[in-house]
Image (cartoon, rainbow, N blue to C red):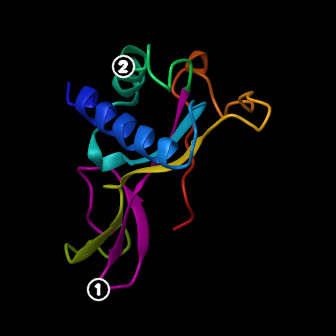
Amino acid sequence: MHEMGITNGILAASFDAARNAGAEKICEIRISIGDLTEIQEFALQFAFEALTPGTMAEGATLAVTHIPATSHCNECGADYTHDRFEMLCPECGAFNVTQVTGREMQIDSIETPDEDGTCPEPTATPADGLLTTDYPEV
């Protein structure tokens, strides 16, 4: 389960950024993950819940945005989404394509408490299940 190590890295980077900003608590961490990374969100959420007790992220939420796999056909110019097995251009069938998105993994933002010390309403909560799915226009 490599998601445990990934989550540990997300938390370490988030702790550093929050401390550098003068925060003592993290309310929410928002990340984006490309569909081709094969990172399992359920395992990320499990690791997040296992690693955050006793830390500045205890009680925080992890909001995940999924980025679809997209490619550009270098033969006909088509832009399209695909899964990890079907990268051929759906317009002309060419193999000569350039992958555009789908392998990303990044921390988008870290939410800390308001000036009064309360956390804003989270984008999502662990009870929501597997959180957000936002696909950009291609």
Residue 93 percent across, percent down from the top left: 27, 71
Q: Observer-nearest residue: 122 or 18?
A: 18
Residue at 57 percent of width and 48 percent of height: 134
Q: Residues within 10 Å of mark 2 (few under 14, many from 20)?
A: some
Q: Amino acid at mark 1?
A: Glu
Earlier residue among tags 2 and 1: 2
Disc 2 from disc 1: Cα separation: 47 Å
Of circles 2 and 1, the one toward us is 2
Q: How many marks?
A: 2
Q: Quadrant of residue 47?
A: top left
Residue displayed at 38% across by 34% down: 11
In which quadrant of the rendered image does the N terminus lie? top left
Residue 32 screen position, x and y as percent? 45, 48
Tell me if I can see residue 71 in this picture. yes
Q: Is residue 45 above or below residue 93?
A: above
Is 41 positioned to the left or the right of 38 in the image?
right
Q: Is residue 72 magenta?
A: yes
Residue sitting at x 51%, y 42%: 18
Q: Which residue lies under the disc numbered 2?
A: 51
Instruction: Tell me the magenta residue range.
Output: 61-89
Please tell me whether mark 1 sits on a helix, a strand or a loop.
loop
Q: Which residue is mark 1?
A: 75
Q: Quadrant of residue 100?
A: bottom left
The answer to whether residue 65 is visible is no
Please tell me the numbered disc located at residue 11: none
Residue type marked 2? Leu
Q: Is residue 23 above or below residue 105?
A: above
Q: Image check: 99 left or right of 126?
A: left
